[in-house]
Amino acid sequence: MTLLPTLGFAAPLDCVIEPEAIINLVSSEKGRISSINVRRGSLVKKGDVLVVLEDDVQRHNLAMAQVRKESTLEMEAAQARLSQRTKDLDRAQTLVDRNVAAKTQVEDAQIEVEMMKLAVEQAHLTAALAEIEYQQARTLLDHRTLNSPIDGVVVAVQAAPGAFASEQLQLLTLADIDPLHVEVFAPLEYYDEVTEGDVFQVTQSAPLTGTFDATVRAVDKVFDAASGTFGIQLTVPNRSGQIPAGTRCEIDLSR
């Protein structure tokens, strides 16, 4: 895309540079806050640990679940009993073949073997449930940590260590500042002059002096009849995070 020249048409229009999104974070879990690892103005990356709730109970539960998951005692015991019952069945069959024992001994031994096979299946089921319980315990522990959902900046910290977190307590406010949005309401005569993908220059209002290329992302298809204007949204890359959001600006849409 090439920068569109301005050909003089009217005075530059007022605009506003805003964040991509504002996110208010709350905890899905209840509990006392152990630590808050950021402060107002901190730059954060997606996945960074922001808030940690007290998690002693969850850590103990995870440790117990891990012990149950890693234990092979029930499986080994069931397999050992099955092996022994299989040998008993073989001996009973040999005795019957020699006419030394009654067939009922073989039948009883067969029942014991089948019972031990069920015990082995039960041990497999117990192991599978132990794995699920372990994953559940890990998930519950993970929920005691609040991670950043975006790359952005901390706008406000509304809680402190020692406070009781719940879904009703707002903990942090984050702003996604890459890219930035530029919002402008233009007179209707500009409607045919602007299309998605066009690039215009945006200049920050004094005392700021930055000038940036902004790409049109959306052009409103519904006009404001009262003011005779329509909305335009543009985006400005801000990978370094150096361009502040929440500032006024000017844009010349004429060509």
Image: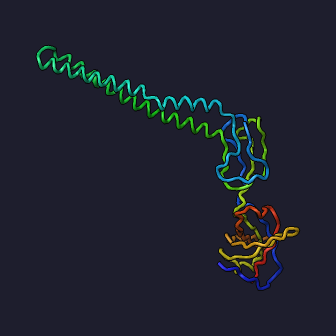
Q: Does residue 227 appear in this view?
A: no
Decide if residue 138 is on the left or right side of residue 222: left
| Residue 39 versus residue 99 in the image, above or below | below
For residue 20, what is the image quadrant? bottom right
For residue 159, what is the image quadrant? top right
x then y, percent, for residue 191: 71, 78
Decide if residue 233 is on the left or right side of residue 106: right
| Residue 174 versus residue 26 in the image, above or below | below
Locate the C terminus and report the quarter of the image it occupies. Answer: bottom right
Q: Residue furthest bottom?
A: 7
For residue 250, what is the image quadrant? bottom right
Q: Residue at x 28, y 21 (%)?
A: 85
x then y, percent, for residue 124: 39, 32
Count up the numbered dots: 0
Q: Residue at x 66, y 46 (%)?
A: 147
Decide if residue 12 is on the left or right side of residue 66: right
Q: Residue at x 60, y 29 (%)?
A: 60
Q: 225 or 249, which is in the foreground?
A: 249
Locate the N terminus and report the quarter of the image it occupies. Answer: bottom right
x then y, percent, for residue 57: 63, 30
Colouring rule applied to residues: rainbow
Q: 85 or 204, which is in the foreground?
A: 85
x then y, percent, for residue 24: 72, 49
Q: Does residue 58 appear in this view?
A: yes
Q: 245 or 239, which is in the foreground?
A: 239
Q: Residue at x 33, y 22 (%)?
A: 81
Decide if residue 126 is on the left or right side of residue 48: left
